[in-house]
Each structure stands twice: as C-alpha cells, then as structure tokens.
Image (cartoon, helix red, strand yellow):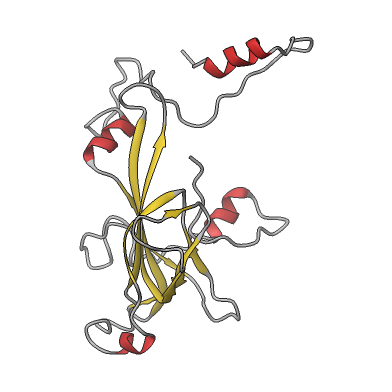
Amino acid sequence: MIISPPFIREQNAGDSEDSWVNSMLPIDATRSFPLNAHGSWHGGVHVTHSDKTHHPEMVRAIADGVVVSFRKPSGTDKRDAFPLNYNGQTDNGYVLLKHETSIGSGDSGSIVFYSLYMHLRDRLDPAVAEGARIWRKDPIGMNGMVDGVNAFHFQVFCDDENMLKLTGRTTPEVDITRDGRTDTLYGDIHFYLPPGTPFTHRYLTQLHRTRPA
C-alpha cells in the first residue's frame, strides 16, 4: 500500500523528497504525540496550515480506504461560541477511514489500520459517506481551526492485534538473540538480472513467486 501526506503541494525544483514531505506536515509543537503542552495524552498531531489563499488547502486521504464514521462540520459561526469556542475558535468536522493491506504472507500478512482527520470546516467532500470507498489523495474535507489556530488533528492507529503483526513483538525491545520475522515483507522486492538473461513467461512467473529468505 502506498501512503501519501494528508496535504498535496507542488514540489519545488530544489526540494529533496524529505523536505517536500516535511513541508506538508508542519506539526504544532504544543499539540504533538503522545502529549500536548499541558502533559495530557494526545493521540495524534496537529498539522498547521494557512487557509488565507484563494484556494484553501484540502485534506486528503493518506491511503485507499473505507469511510467508517464522519461528522459534517457545523457552520463557521458555531466555532465562535461554546462548546466549540473553548480555548479559541474550533471546527468540528471529522472523517475516520479504515485501511486494509498486505505486508507479507501467513497469518500475520494482513493488517488493518485507521486514519483520523479532525477539525475540518465548512463542508466535507460529497464522496464522503458511510461505507464509501475513498482512494489515496482523494479530497475528504477542508482544513479548519482548532483553539484559534489554523490546524487539523491527524492520527494513524490500530489495535494491539495488528500492532503485534506489524512489530512481531509485544515488548519495546528487539530480541537480538533470535532471527527476525520471515513471513512479513516491507517495501518492494527488486531483482538484478544480468545481461543476456532470457525473459520467458515461466521465468517471470517464478520471479513473482520468489520471496526473500
């Protein structure tokens, strides 16, 4: 599964891949993970932005998924009053997506995770409906405000069962006395074919079935 940032902006000619991605994920240091500035638990991060241009930025799905839950934003006038104006103007639209992907073979080869986008304003994209299929980079809503700051809450999470599949362990430390997992593969497989290698259908089929030791 390919994952994209929740904003998609033009990449400048001199930008490296890292700087380009970081430019789309400016994090509010006071609302980071796992604690906010007050020392309270915070399950995600607040991504700051500017919506003062003629074309406000749209929040986009980070991966292919299905809409599990959503709430249409209240009008922008509602963010001026309690309960939305608690520490400052806040928008209350949100979208929760469920993602399923394969990371290898065997019982631990398939995982489920979720992405959450909160503090969306004005409207959600018309495609957002319960059970609707959403594709990577699809717009899902317009970025809003939280506590008087142009930002939205972004969070990726899964349950303990799927976390175990991802990490292969239940403890923070890696057990270096034994081999790592052999049934799970991250990333792509690349093959080097020397010059003169015959390309036959049978040979390519064997390559597709190959897995690293």
- Residue 121 in sight from this viewpoint: yes
Quick one: 198 or 144, which is closer to the camera? Answer: 198
Q: Position of residue 172 (x, y in %)?
A: 25, 34
Furthest toward the right, the residue is 196
Q: Is residue 173 above or below residue 137?
A: above
Q: Position of residue 76 (x, y in %)?
A: 38, 85
On screen, residue 88 versus residue 24, left or right, reads: left
The quadrant holding residue 80 is bottom left
Quick one: 204 or 177, which is closer to the camera? Answer: 204
On screen, residue 125 versus residue 146, left or right, reads: right
Q: Is residue 76 above or below residue 151?
A: below
Q: Position of residue 12 (x, y in %)?
A: 69, 59
On screen, residue 194 versus residue 131, left or right, reads: right
Which residue corresponds to the image point at 63% horizontal and 19% vertical from the top-left? Answer: 191
- Residue 45 in sight from this viewpoint: no
Q: Across the whole image, how many numbered discs are drawn on residues?
A: 0
Which residue corresponds to the image point at 56% horizontal and 19% vertical from the top-left? Answer: 208
Q: Position of residue 121 (x, y in %)?
A: 40, 76
